[in-house]
Image: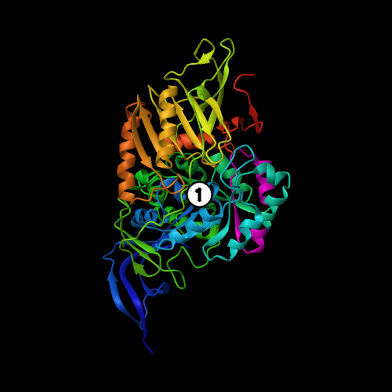
Amino acid sequence: MIQTVTWHIINAKILDVFNLKFEETELWIDHSQIIYRGKRDDLTAKQTFDANGKYIVPGLIDAHMHIESSLLSPSEFAKLVIPHGVTRVVADPHEIASVAGISGIQYMLEEARQSPLHIHYMLPSSVPATPFEHAGATLNADALKPFYSVPEINGLAEVMDFPAVFNKDGDMHQKIDDARAAGKHVDGHASGLNRQQLAIYRKYGIDTDHESENAKQALDRLNAGFSVFVREGTVERDELAILPAINQANQSHFSFATDDKTANDIQKEGSIDYNVKIAIQNGMSAEMAYTIASYNAAKAHQLENVGALTDGFVADLSIVNNLTDLVTEKVMLNGEWYSETETTVLPLANQSLNFSLTETDLILKLDAEKPAHIIEIMPHHITTKHVIEEVPTIKGVFTPNESYAKIVVAERYHNLGHGIGIIKGFKLKNGAIASTIAHDSHNIIITGTNDQDMIIAANTLRDIGGGEVVVNNGKITILPLSIGGLMSSESYQKVIQTNNALQKAFSEISDLKFDPFLTLSFMALPVIPSLKITDQGLFDFNHFSFINIQD
């Protein structure tokens, strides 16, 4: 008896992820499922696709990322990444959850349902990330537990509060237990943790991590039993340093992730396809690189029948022209060839900005005879150096210059005050930049050379309801982000265009060679080494406590 299916793909070199090789064969697809890999005389298809000898790989999977960092809504983000062969992402919505709580998670679920992109959400484990900053919401275990019945929810997102795990905090452990009881898994966030601390995470069932910055850290995590996500984003450029850790014997424990990548960089470089290109250009076989980018990520997230091109698996795949250019020519999701369709970005109830700052608030008094604790940027990393240096002062007041800028974080939800410090590495010749993206609580963050421009930047953010701004001697350039101060309601094309103008404006006040806004946003994240600043003050990660700017 002849069975009729939807698609028959012929003349293709198809990746076998189980044996790490390309095979000249064919695929039979019925609706969303691959029925058979190979020749069959008892099957016929409504439509035949001739691949003309090109390569077919499974749909790429971003193992850990935050859609909010693209500055796009989920539906617009999908339009940008699908043409790069990405058919599935595992997203942590803790950015919008930190701003809008449960309604933020519900928004991300609803908005994403407009798109064919498979978006799996991990529930935010740490809102707020620590007790050392004020967020717009607090999500305890009881608030999260009902979401495990939602099909798109795949587990508990990056657990970043190690002290809460180590000290057996009741609510944190309840979150972990609830996820596992629901048959889900738990992602880690092990920045700065040593081998013994990693063992504590594993003891409680945390099984992945994306915070490796080099091969040694990656192998520490591998030896502790973690699945390791190799990260290459806009700021977090870790892949080259990690690649030496990956070999034929251990490759199945590695996946690729972007974590935080702007729409501009996705358009310019790519998404997970860029991770693949870096790996291949640095000596990894294409077979291994594409397997890491697909099947391995599916296994790490316990996704059944995902990430391979054979019998019973979901029909997510892409056509690649060759193994040199690695251009994605055509993408199939759920058994249907992708073509962009028009959608409308859904609104989120306005999250008003409630803060006040004056030039007087920004005065930083220092003892000219004493050095100061300073945040020093590490290019292409979200970690910082904690340096102690003498800084310029006039009449006992800190005076910024091209080496040292002022940095301020102001609580945006209830006008609870601000923290002020000194940062090194932005190379600001003049002016100021500010943003409502300040991980993870997303308060107002500003850095600048003069108080006047810093206040203009802060007031502009309030006027536009959130976003990013450059002020150059009173001249204002903006990127409005109306969705919680994190994402734009515009199309991805418009956001990229506006962001290009913003970056150009920044280039007039600094010659920094990496994204200043995403870099700035992580200066407020106290769970990342070494010195950060929150709305409550200067925070020393190594001692996990606040410090004075001068001892």
Residue 508 position (above or below residue 229): above
Q: Identify which residue, 511 or 216, lies in the foreground.
A: 511
Quadrant into which the N terminus falls: bottom left
| Residue nearer the viewer, 205 or 471 | 471
Q: Is residue 296 visible?
A: no
- Who's the residue at 58% across and 66% down the image? 149
Give left or right: position of 5 versus 357: left
Count of numbered labels shown in the rendering: 1
Q: Is residue 117 left or right of residue 139?
A: left
Q: Amino acid at mark 1?
A: Ile
Residue 154: image location, x then y, percent: 55, 60
Residue 131 vs 85, above or below: the answer is above
Whether residue 462 is visible to the viewer of this picture, yes or no, is yes
Q: Position of residue 150 (x, y in %)?
A: 55, 65
Write the start and end of the magenta stretch as one range. 178-203
Q: Quadrant of the C terminus?
A: top right
Q: Quadrant of residue 364?
A: top right
In this rendering, is residue 48 above or below 494? below
Residue nearest the observer in this picture, 205 or 433: 433
Give the quadrant of residue 314: bottom left
Q: Which residue is mark 1?
A: 96
Question: Residue 171: within the magenta?
Answer: no
Q: Position of residue 516 (x, y in %)?
A: 41, 34
Describe the element under mark 1 as helix, strand or loop. Answer: helix
Picture colour scheme:
rainbow
Magenta residue check for 192: yes
Residue at the image point whose x is 65% and y is 41% from the top: 195
Q: Is 74 left or right of 135, judged from the image as shown?
A: left
- Give the image location of residue 127, x and y in percent: 59, 47
Q: Count neighbours of disc 1 (C-alpha within 10 A) and say few if under 14, some if 14 to 19, many if 20 or more.
A: many
- Residue at 53 percent across and 31 percent down: it is 384
